[in-house]
Image (cartoon, helix red, strand yellow):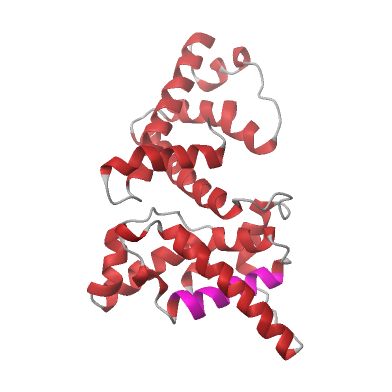
Amino acid sequence: MKGLEQTYERFRTTRWTEIRALGEGGEDQRRAALEALVTRYWPAVYAHLRARGQDRESAAELTQAFFAEVVLHRDLFTKAAPGRGKLRTLLLTALNRFRVDRRRRAVARGAEVTIPIEALHAEEARLGRPPDAVDHIFERRWALGLFEEALRRCEAHFRDSGRAAHWDLCEARILRPAISGNEPGPLSEMPEAMGFASPALAAAAVQVVKRRAMGLLREVVAETVNEEEDVEAELAEVRRYLTLG
């Protein structure tokens, strides 16, 4: 299954047109939409299972089994519709039911089969270790995917517009320290190396990138909802899960 074999594919946002393509599109459209949805949501499913106590190999096996048995075989995504609530809620509810059902069947069989999936190494490295707090881990991983897509678009924007130094400075000043947990170096030491004439101009460039990133995050979130009036509420949820404010 492509979505489970390619761990670090670019995250693409959910569009309801993809959901409609599952039921109304041709075979090629259906396959493309299904692969996009699987690619988008399996990291959140995997993170949720790891946070619930599954080891790496068991979580990998359950993730693959869930998408094969429930999402594909039972056409789970075709049950989604704008008026029926959020797609991730449908997915998480189905996942929890599947997890309980699999546990019952494993007890009845007296054994549980695990299938290692090497392609999940990158996702495991992203997690670092199973989180201590399991509440909302699915939603947090979903929100992180949206944020990653916004950052990808942001980097492309500044590099394509000839302002790569803006992005490089913001990455060095904010993103890398946030990932590593280290304090960023003094801004006064960065301008010359990054091509800025003064710390003030460097600081202004960082703010330009931050504003663009937040605007792109709103754009990405808007692609996941069916109605314009839902964008702000969904954006607030994303920010809450990311603890951005």
Instruction: Tell me if 60 is positioned left or right of 39 in this view.
Output: right
Q: Is residue 66 visible to us here?
A: yes
- Numbered-mark total: 0
Indicate the position of residue 85 as horizontal and vertical percent values.
38, 57
Write the residue at 43% across / 30% down: 164
In terms of depth relative to the viewer, which is nearer, 122 or 195? 122
Indicate the position of residue 221 as horizontal and vertical percent values.
38, 44
Magenta span dominant secondary structure: helix
Write the residue at 55% across / 15% down: 192
Reply above or below: 132 against 109. above
In terms of depth relative to the viewer, which is nearer, 65 or 165? 65
In terms of depth relative to the viewer, which is nearer, 197 or 185? 185
Indicate the position of residue 238 as horizontal and vertical percent values.
48, 42
When asked about the image quadrant of residue 160, the answer is top left
Instruction: Tell me if 138 is positioned left or right of 74 in this view.
Output: right
Q: Is residue 153 visible to us here?
A: no
Instruction: Tell me if 132 is positioned left or right of 80 in this view.
Output: right
Q: Is residue 65 magenta?
A: yes
Indicate the position of residue 163 as horizontal and vertical percent values.
39, 27
Write the residue at 65% across / 16% down: 186
Please, which residue is most extreme toward the front here? 84
In terms of depth relative to the viewer, which is nearer, 135 or 138? 135
Instruction: Tell me if 24 is positioned left or right of 101 in this view.
Output: left
Reply above or below: 76 against 182. below
Please, which residue is most extreme toward the right here? 110
When asked about the image quadrant of residue 158, the answer is top left
Reply above or below: 94 against 185. below
Q: Is residue 177 magenta?
A: no
When asked about the image quadrant of residue 152, the answer is top left
**Segment colored magenta:** 57-71
Write the residue at 66% across / 69% down: 59
